[in-house]
Structure formats: C-alpha cells, structure tokens
Amino acid sequence: MCEVKTLSQRGSTVISQCIECKMLNIWHNNLLFNFTPQQFADFCSFVGSLEFEDRSHPFPDGQERAILKTPVEHLNFTFTKDEWEDMKAAMDEATYMQTVFALIR
C-alpha cells in the first residue's frame, strides 16, 4: 500500500496523494476514484463545470441527487447536494494543496 498524505477532507470526501507514485485518490463513502495527476486535473475541471441543478433528479427516497455518468454505460454515481458540494470543495482544496506542496519541494 502506498504511503499517502491527505490533501483535503470535506464531509465524507477525503482526497489523498501517494508520496511515491503521485497517484491521487478520492475516497467518498463506498467509492474510491484513482487518478494520475493529469487525470485528476481533468476530472476536477470536468466536475467543476457541472451544476448540481442541471444533473439532479428525485430518487425513490425523496432526495434530489446529481447523477455523474461514467464511460461505462451502466455505471453511474449519485450525490446529494451536500455530497456534491463537499466533493467539489475538496477537489478545489486538494488542487491548491498540490500547488503548495510543489512550491515547498
């Protein structure tokens, strides 16, 4: 297992980066996303351009959730408004912390 440093934590979203290989992880409840630094930057840019209201739908439990489609047609992720905002804020903070750590090196 990689030795990681936490870059951000908001709500149930934690973003960490491996000290050696530089892979980034977004941990959110039972989801785990893994990215190279460039893939993470691209994902942040993509998600940052999306609005919750444009992607949300009422679910059977009565909550509105945003649907984040994946390249796999039958695999999608859903987020409540708070989870969506936490993830976006955590990604912004993690991007900022990457810049800070790069300046320190």
Image (cartoon, rainbow, N blue to C red):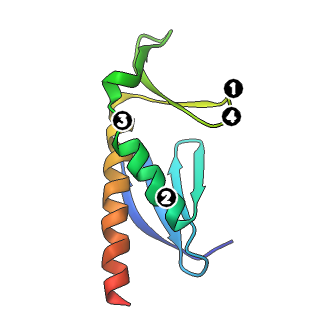
Mark 1 sits on what residue?
Answer: 74
Helix, strand or loop status at disc 3: loop
User: Disc number at residue 72?
Assistant: 4
Callout 3, which amino acid? Answer: Leu
In this orientation, which residue lies closer to the viewer: 55 or 19? 55
The alpha-carbon separation of the residues under discs 1 and 2 comes to 22 Å
Quadrant assignment, res 46: top left
Residue sticking out furthest to the bottom: 105
Q: Is residue 30 above or below residue 9?
A: above
Residue 59 placement (x, y as % from top left) = 48, 13
The alpha-carbon separation of the residues under discs 3 and 4 comes to 19 Å
The alpha-carbon separation of the residues under discs 3 and 1 comes to 20 Å
Q: Is residue 57 above or below residue 37?
A: above
Mark 3 or mark 4: whose residue is earlier in sequence: 3
The structure residue drawn at horizontal position 68% and vertical position 34%, both measured from the top left corner, is: 72
Left or right of residue 74: residue 10: left
Quadrant assignment, res 25: bottom right
Callout 2, which amino acid? Answer: Phe
In this orientation, which residue lies closer to the viewer: 85 or 99? 99
Callout 4, which amino acid? Answer: Val
Mark 3 sits on what residue?
Answer: 50
Q: Is residue 85 above or below residue 5?
A: above
The structure residue drawn at horizontal position 48% and vertical position 64%, both measured from the top left corner, is: 16
Mark 2 sits on what residue?
Answer: 40
Labelled pair 2, 3 in contact (Cβ < 8 Å): no
Quadrant assignment, res 41: bottom left
Around disc 3, counting alpha carbons within 10 Å, would you say few (fewer than 14), some (14 to 19), or many (20 or more)? few
Helix, strand or loop status at disc 2: helix
Helix, strand or loop status at disc 1: loop
Callout 1, which amino acid? Answer: His
The alpha-carbon separation of the residues under discs 2 and 3 comes to 16 Å
Mark 3 or mark 1: whose residue is earlier in sequence: 3
